[in-house]
Amino acid sequence: MILRRSAPLCLVLGLATSLAGATGVFAADSATSSIASYTLIAPKSEVPSGLLARAVIASGAGCPALTGRTGRGQSFALRMQLRPKPALAGAAYSAVEVCERGIPTGTVSAMVGSRVIPASLPSRIERIALSGDSGCRISSWEVQDCSNTSAWPLARISRNMAKDNPDVIINLGDYFYREAVCPATDQGLCASNPPPPGNLPVTGSAMGWIADALIPMQPVFDAAPILMVRGNHESCARGGIGFFLFFSPQRSTALQCAPEMVDGAVVVPSNDISPTWNATWLVGDSDATAHTLDLEIIDSAYGQDGTVDAYAATQRSSYVAAASHVAKSRPDEAWLLTHRPIFGMISTQFTDGGPVWTSADQAAASQGLLGGFSLVLSSHIHVAQAVNIPGQPAQIVLGNGATELDPTTGYDTPTYGPLSNVDGSALSPLATPYPAPTSTWTDVRFGYVIATPGARSTSWMFEHRDQRGKPFASCAVAKRSANCKATT
Ligand SMILES: [Fe+2]
Ligand SMILES: [Fe+2]
């Protein structure tokens, strides 16, 4: 969400930021010069196992080997390949290179260089960790205390999430928030923040990504394979080059945000959308309740939040692809993962009396295509939230993953539905208003979710945990509805 505060949060003196530590990580794995290594959930069309090993290395260090062992006792050593990097990314990304290799099916242990990485998913998944909106906000109007582990608790959340032993991790996007030079008045909060490149029409850089994501997320990288969703902070003009270099699991997207020379000026694409992809897992708390869960992953980096415009028609193809795959593959259950929520409410403190529903372009683009889904998972609004719209899948929002939170008040259940004005009239002639929600729930504190399947097939418990790992609320998910309550 874009905040509309007039004054930056500069009340707390901070310690020196962690970037000095970030550069030190270049030497953390001396055998490979690996800055970070992790296992991405990837489309089966990319790699039959659905798992892709990545290593971020200092440029010129040479890719480490991917080594491991299969369940049949066979060892393997595979050469990792450099992921293509945009030629005109220049100095902004010159410090690093990214190596990748598909993990062979049947692997039981794997290493990148001398570092162990998650090698497999369990045959039946019982525990999913989820979060979103994680970067430390540095903008011209708002500065988070990037050196304070309570004010920007991504490292703490990562550690506690890892301690919860998830089988798999889902991150719902908006990783990159270090979009401005640290203001002179806020040096105590962000003194050693890597500045935007300056010579590219983007705000992201390799060093910014290292500080905002690659280092603080290492505990979750070590814990389990991770599925990464693209957020609007990963649009090409922002952190997009880094997202497609580090976190997109599709090889075809490596150069999606590549800068180009047009009429003597360097430009980056806009309104680019990467293809919808999917992952299917066997989930359940026992063999008796085991069932297939299909995840459809949408790129919603673009689009209007407060209005419906022509972009909705462009974005619709993403949701058509998702709905078509669900209809064709007929899983027992399907979740839609899209960074911008389809049924998400912002605080009335942001609306000036207007409607609270956001991501109007996504709501319009997906209209009529959600029948196969039981749940929509998003972030984008910096709160934890659940919304039930009659006849639609439940919407859960998890935008409380460490980025500066939204206001703590202003989330009363509206008497009008998404794509409506406050009086219930249509927001746009391009889309039909939804009915008012039957219930909503919002909690504004940092944290994450551990989701576990229930005793009944397709029922789930989403347990919200704070930055220290302490449960504070739970949402029972069943029959396309999410019913949340505070932990007592
Ligand atoms: Fe965000
Ligand atoms: Fe966002």
Image (tube, rainbow, N blue to C red):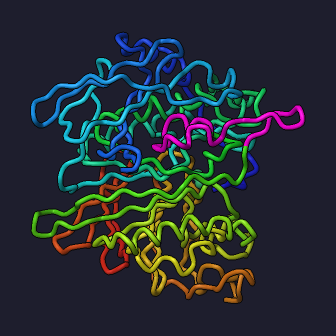
Q: Nearer the viewer, residue 164 or 235?
A: 235
Q: Position of residue 145 (x, y in %)?
A: 57, 35
Q: Quadrant of residue 159?
A: top left
Q: Is residue 443 in view?
A: no
Quadrant in which the N terminus is drawn = bottom right
Q: Nearer the viewer, residue 163 or 347?
A: 163
Residue at screen point 25% across, 48% down: 167
Q: Nearer the viewer, residue 260 or 355?
A: 260
Q: Position of residue 385 (x, y in %)?
A: 47, 66
Q: Would you say residue 262 sits in the magenta stretch?
A: yes
Q: Position of residue 67 (x, y in %)?
A: 26, 24
Residue at screen point 35% across, 55% down: 449
Residue at screen point 68% across, 54% down: 3
Q: Nearer the viewer, residue 16 or 461?
A: 461
* Figure check: 435 above or below 397: below
Give the magenta range. 241-268
Residue at screen point 76% across, 31% down: 200
Q: Is residue 393 in view?
A: yes
* Figure check: 269 above or below 461: above
Q: Position of residue 122 (x, y in %)?
A: 19, 49
